Amino acid sequence: MFALARAISGDVGGALIAGLVFAFDPFRFSHYSHLELEFSYWMPLAALCVLRTLATGDRGAGVLAGALVALQGLSSLYLGAYFALSLAVLVQCRIGVFGRPTRRALVPLGVVVLIGTATAALVTIPYWANRSAVGERSVDEIRAYSARGRDYLTASRRSALYGMRLFEREGGERELFPGTAPLLLGAAALLPPLEPAAVVVAVTLATSVDASLGLNGTIYSWLHKLPPFRGFRAPARFRAIAGLYLALLAGVGAVAIARRIGSVWRSRATLWAIGLAVLVDVHPAIELQPLWNHAPGIYKYVPDPRSVLADLPLPWGQDAFWHDPVYMYFATFHWHPIVNGSSGFAPAWYEPLGAIARDFPSDATLDAFRELGTEYFVLHEGYYGTAMFRRVVGDVGLQARLEFVATSSWEEGECRLYRLRR
């Protein structure tokens, strides 16, 4: 971001401000649990190479831009797709403001498109293959994850300064307030005399904000007609792209304010003050929790590494789904195939399985799991709750089709392993 902002603003101080705004974007901390959304550093580098390609026609910059766009798509399909669209807008705006690029730039720009398209085609093969199993996102689901205007005044719950003080939140996906300082700096960039580069960035920013509105806005309503975009659930994640361009605009605005001060010393002091104000404004408050570095010992009692496991309880209905990601985390240690899973999509059979699993260990429940190839069940006291766990264990003792294998203690409570008899 520093390199991109310096290329646009021509000022080291402004570039530092832009870097701070981008690095400490509250959206980033709202999505702390979405690891792929933290990998956004390819975007400013790709934008820098694209702008350099437009300005100079440098083929090397074009190839590098294509590679960086591809890396962004590989790091996060959401950010890769959304950022690629914003790049198209950025290029069009730059052409509109600065004039058409030279013919020399057309080939490198074509390389950017070619590399990005080829990567997208390869990366999305599994997604297209899964469409027959999981279908498309429903309109209601997409609308629920589409931003509204008030969401841009809803602070991140992890904001040290704002916290719960602004609008009531409607889920972490729609905590979109970028902070007061970035907004004021962005507005300062649009005061006369207006820099042409600021116009380019501002239009791209406005386009990204509208796209984040999803089916409540104009741009995404059109994009939704295209099959690839009917697989994305959260248009509000366009906010990450908007954050990129707001950071750029904030850097330009900081330079504009500093230049109005007059003397070099005062300008530098002003930039320092702006930087401190930004850090105070966007400072996060994150309560980190220790994470296990091993799975419960119960899994070592499964003799065949190819045996399919089911970790219970399964989520169902209004139950919290958070323990399914825990089961998946455990699987990265024991590496047995598991029935459980957690993602933005779930197979059509998974929710009904969760419902019938509430009657475990009934014959109907065991039949449903057997159809999925399940051979072993791991019961977790920590996620059942002690009273329910004891009741289920008692019922299992009366079920002739289940054979007790082992028990072990765990930080969250007892774990018990049972084998489904053939």
Image (cartoon, grey):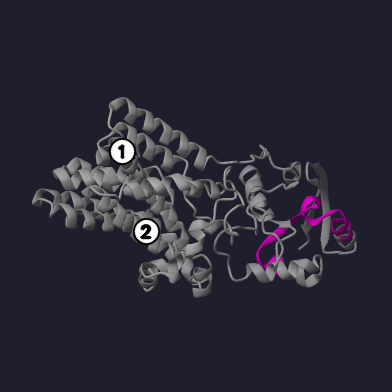
Give how far across and how far down residue 329 sits, in percent: 63, 47
Classed neighbour count for the residue bearing mark 2: other residues with Cα under 10 Å, few (<14), some (14–19), many (≥20): many
Residue 353: quarter of image? bottom right
Q: Which residues are magenta?
A: 366-391
Give how far across and how far down residue 285 sits, in percent: 60, 41
Q: Nearer the viewer, residue 395 or 237?
A: 237
- Farthest residue toward the left? 103
Give how far across and how far down residue 262 sits, in percent: 27, 32
Report if the CB atoms under discs 2 and 1 are less than 8 Å apart.
Answer: no
Which numbered dot is residue 208? 2
Give how far across and how far down residue 348 sits, in percent: 59, 71
User: Along the horizontal axis of the image, is 26 left or right of 49?
Assistant: right
Q: Residue at x 52, y 47 (%)?
A: 35
Which numbered dot is residue 98? none
Q: Nearer the viewer, residue 188 or 43?
A: 188
Q: Is residue 378 magenta?
A: yes
Q: Residue at x 14, y 49 (%)?
A: 105
Residue 118 visible at all: no
The quadrant of the picture occupied by the N terminus is top left
Task: Report the Cα–Cα distance between label 2 and label 1.
Answer: 23 Å
User: Along the horizontal axis of the image, is 298 left or right of 84?
Assistant: right
Disc 1: which residue: 255
Residue 397 visible at all: yes
Q: Residue at x 27, y 58 (%)?
A: 89
Q: Which secondary structure lies at badge 1?
A: helix
User: Along the horizontal axis of the image, is 369 left or right of 67?
Assistant: right
Q: Is residue 291 above or below residue 70?
A: above
Residue 225: quarter of image? bottom left
Q: Which secondary structure lies at badge 2?
A: helix
- Say whether disc 2 or disc 1 marks the residue closer to the N-terminus: 2
